[in-house]
Amino acid sequence: MLNFSNDALATSPQTHLVPVSGMFTFTVPTATYSKFFLFFNGAAGGTAIKVTLTYSDAMDTQNATIPDYYSDPTDPTVFNLAPNLAKWDMKTAINEADHHNINGVALTTMPTKMLTSVKVERGAQVRASARPARPRALPAASRSRQSRPATRAAVVE
């Protein structure tokens, strides 16, 4: 889990950086999940991701496009979780006053299967930009077992 708190130092890690062609995997409590969400922010034109849900007896892969932080989602599985946020620097000063978004991805689960882990792979930038894309993963918000909605935070910037 990441240290995502108002009490954390401004210099503490608040996101997980995922480089181009990078990936990360996390386990979940083995259970059935009726819903599963990941949360991202994107930069440099946006980023394509591939998510693999591993069940005790099956696997399912889903793709999504995380937009640039300034753009609204065009992928039907992606939504704005927290729109129009300010951008802060490590000295707690506002760099940009607004229009930074945290996006969510609504994943389709196999609600009768036991989910065991999730793998997120980052693809290439959606379009070229002068600055490199820097995917970042946000901390988990909550989990739910036994066919209740599950929320897991992972963010790409």
Image: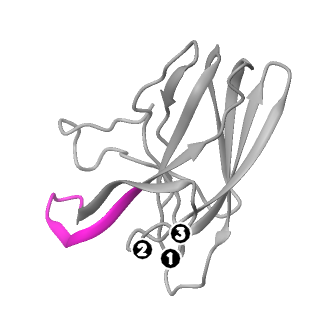
Residue assigned mark 2: 71
Query: What SS does tag 2 mark?
Result: loop
Q: Is 115 situated above or below 21?
A: above
Mark 1 secondary-structure assignment? loop
Mark 3 residue crowding within 10 angstroms, few (<14) / some (14–19) / many (20+)? few
Q: Which residue is situated farthest in the right direction here?
A: 57
According to the picture, the residue beneath numbered tag 1 turns out to be 44
| Residue shown at the point (79%, 38%) measured from the top left | 60
In this picture, residue 42 sits left or right of residue 65? left
The residue positioned 58% from the left and 64% from the top of the image is: 75
Contact? badges 3 and 2 (CB < 8 Å) = yes
Per the rendering, the mark at residue 10 is none
Instruction: Assess disc 1: are there few (<14), some (14-19) or many (≥20) residues with their C-alpha within 10 Å of its C-alpha.
Output: many
Amino acid type of the residue that numbered disc 2 sits on in the rendered structure: Ser
Residue at image location 41% in from the left, 36% down from the top: 2
Indicate the secondary structure of the residue bearing disc 3: loop
Kindly identify which residue carries mark 3: 74
Dot 2, crowdedness within 10 Å: few (<14), some or many (≥20)? Answer: some
**Mark 3 vs mark 1: which is more N-terminal?**
1
Image quarter for residue 56?
Answer: top right
Looking at the image, residue 47 lies above or below residue 140: below
Q: As shown in the figure, which amino acid type bears the numbered disc 1?
A: Ala
Between disc 3 and disc 2, the foreground one is 3
Tell me: residue 124, above or below residue 108.
Answer: below
Which quarter of the rendering shows the N terminus? top left
In the image, the segment drawn in magenta is 89-102
Mark nearer the viewer, 3 or 1: 3
- Label 3 vs label 2: CA separation? 9 Å
Give coordinates of residue 85: x percent, y percent.
Answer: 24, 61
Question: Tag 3: residue type?
Answer: Thr
